[in-house]
Structure formats: C-alpha cells, structure tokens
Image: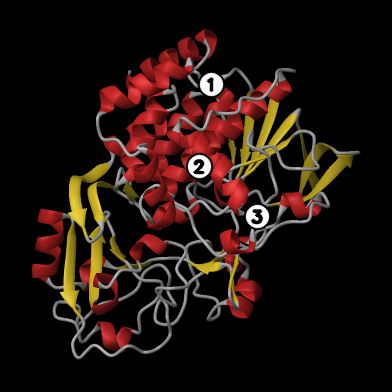
Amino acid sequence: MKVVVIGGGWAGCAAALSAAKQGAEVTLAERTDMLLGTGLVGGIFRNNGRFTATEEAIALGGGELFELMDAHAVHKNIEFPGHKHASLYNIMTIEQGVARLLKGFGVQLRMSTRVTDVAMDGQRMAAVMTAKDAGEERFEADAFVETTGTSGNPYACGKYGNGCGMCVLRCHAFGVRVSIAGRAGIAEITGKKGDQFGAMSGSCELIRESLADDVLAEMSRTGMVMRPIPEFEDDGSGKLDIKACQQYTQAEYKTNVVVLDTGGAKLMTPYFPLPLLRRVRGFENARYSDPYGGTFGNSIRYINMAPRNDALKIDGLENVFCAGEKAGLLVGHTEAVVTGTLAGYNAARHADGKQPLILPDTLLAGDAVSHVREQMQTEKGLGMKFTFSGSVFFERMKQRGSYLTDVAEIRRRVAVTGLANVFAACPDVAAMHRKTVAVSAD
C-alpha cells in the first residue's frame, strides 16, 4: 500500500501518521522547509468544543498528535475571552516533535518539495510531480491525500485581501501553493460572504522580546494579556468580520489588544497598525515577527476547497482524499488533525482494496464532516466558518448535546458506535514504533 500526502500542515501530518499506522508506505511532500504550516504561529487547542474533539479522537485511537500537543504545552486549562479550558502548545518546539513522531512510524518526509502537477489515468491519479533543476521528480501511489490548504498566493491575497502580508506560508521563498484537485480538473469551491471572497487569517505573531517586562510576566503567569486600546475608534475596516476564526469577533477583541503566550506572542487580530499598537501600554516597542506585514494584512484563506464526500474522498477522483481546509470551511488545528486522521485512514483502506469509513453523526467528527459538506452546498453556508471552539458550529454542538468535558462519557459514546480504537496502529506497525522509540531513547 503506497500513499502520498501533499502538504505538511497539521492535516497532512495527521493523514500521513494515520495511513502509516495502517501499514501503508507513506511519503509526505511539504513545499517548505518546516512542517505544520499555520500551526507554526498557532498553538491553541482543547478550548471549548475542541476538548470534546480531542478526547473523542483519543478514544478512536487517533490521539498521538494531541498527546504530543499536551507534551509541548506551555499553558493548560486557561481562559481568555469566549474560551474555556484552553491549552497553548509551544510553537518553538512542536514542529520537531511532530517530525520525530512521523519518522518513528516510518513516514518518509520530503521537505522543500513543491508538487506542481499530476498524472491521471481516467479518474484515477497515477502520480504527482515536482519540478527540479535536473528534471521532473515523480511520486506514484495507490492513493493520495491532498492537504495543500486554501491560502491564496500573493496575487490572491492582493485581489481578495490587503496584499501580501509576508506570512509564515512564505510563498516568495518556496513557491506558491498549487491545488492538486484543480490540476486534476476538479471544479473547486471558494468561500464567499457578500463581496468578500475567502477569509483572512486570524492572528499575527509578535517578537516576545519587544514587549514590556510586565506584559511578559503576566503572559507567563496566566497565558494571556488583554490591554485596552487607548482612545479606541472604529476604523470601519471590519477586520474582525473578515477573519477565518469567527469565534474571535466578540467585543473584547475589538476594543482590546489580546495576546496569548504560545512560546511566541500570538496577537489575536488579522492585522493591527504598528503605530497604534505601540500606543498600548506595554507594547511601546512591539515588533512583528510573522507576518512581517502585520500592520496592514494577512493571508487570505478558503480559496479552492475540494468538493468531497463524507469519507473525505474528492468528488470526481477515484483515489484522492482531502483534509484540513481543503476539505471545507472548518477552522483550526484540532479540526485539521481530526479530518486528516480520517482521510489518511481511508486512503490506506482504499490502497488495500477496502471500503472507506464514514463516521456516524452521533460522533462529533462525523457530524462536523457531514454538516460542513451540506453547508458548503448553500450560498449562506459558504459565507460561514465552522469550528469546534465557537461560532455557529459550537452552538450546534451545545444544542445537540455533543459538547462534553466528561472524558468517561466521551469514551462511552465512542464505544457505543463500535469504533473505539478504530484508528489505532495495526500490530506490526505498533511493534515497529515501540522498537524505534526504544532505540531513540537509548
């Protein structure tokens, strides 16, 4: 069984891990020189309904990446406006932890490998290719998982946003994102709310050392800092309304500067003019790290999503699955890991000649996959964003009684479906991983 995953964000890492746990030979091709994509400036997990999703994934046997986040957490069980029992992983250490985990399960990591084209055999993808100085490099597989994301290139960020924010995706250095489904001839989907196409990334990164000592002390103690914006005036830009993360559009984020301690300093707004930021107490010497253009803009996302079914197979393609933002209007690292785990599992099953798994909607993950697919077929739905941590889908969770913090009850609900540990590693792979870990420890 050969599986190729294109894209090394949280969804791609989860897909690669999940396929490898089922015994597939997995290659993960990542365009840049680091894994995790926007997860390199993210860090929030277990907040609100993401706690439920995390524990459900663990009960399903797909918890390794969440357990790794826990191991790299700089803060656990904190609160910030609109969010309870949140954890923040260390963005400075998590990436290499993920790389070691994947390698331990036999995943072949191909970094700085930008896939640019596909080879088709009818509706079946035969290979993906990357251009090299010495010629084309070809990756053949029985099944593929596309997790290239939906962020625009500098042209799209200029057309639909405020221009290139020089963000962590680093298009100028490593080349722009290439849509694999689009290359295969699939008509893709773009989110649209009124006149706004796509949505803007929801946060910026500040250099910790540029903040005042009292800000750093408060961040280290509580995990977050909230300071009022002096003489606040609404600039009319509606920048919070165009955020991908609609759970952060409440008033506190409009009239205050909110910063989370993720090992870096995560500023919870798509962009913020530096002269105004430096008027906030404790931020007089503030500097942006990622995105460097944080004064005026950020990356535009939710361009080129793939039409797909509830097994996360792309419509019109026989052997290509998708996850993360590529699979629809789901926002967040937890959401990416959940969909990546299912997509990678089903890619391995396809490669092995087995029927794919469709999670029942009595499970949170199953409901998210099916509900978002349904919503993407409506004009109103295309203007929304869905996340376990807030906004419309979190409200749906509460109405359906699927928002739980009782771990025993979450495990019981998984057990009732008969799917407990369905994503767990097959015995041979589990034994190999234990041996690899033991050798590494020695």
- First in sequence: mark 3 or mark 2? 3
Q: Residues within 10 Å of mark 3 (few under 14, many from 20)?
A: many
- Real-space Cα distance between discs 3 and 2? 16 Å
Q: Position of residue 44 (x, y in %)?
A: 32, 51
**Mark 2 and mark 1: span between their CA atoms?**
23 Å
Give the residue pinned by disc 2: 368
Q: Nearer the viewer, mark 1 or mark 3?
A: 3
The answer to whether residue 116 is visible is: no
Q: Residue at x 46, y 44 (%)?
A: 335
Q: Residue at x 69, y 37 (%)?
A: 313
**Which residue lies under the disc numbered 3?**
305
Q: Which residue ends up furthest to the front in the rendered image?
A: 399
Q: With respect to residue 171, does 412 lie above or below?
A: above
Residue visible at 26% across and 82% down? 277
Q: Residue at x 19, y 72 (%)?
A: 211
Return the residue at label 1.
Answer: 21
Residue 109 image point, x, y percent: 57, 37
Residue type highlighted by circle 1: Lys
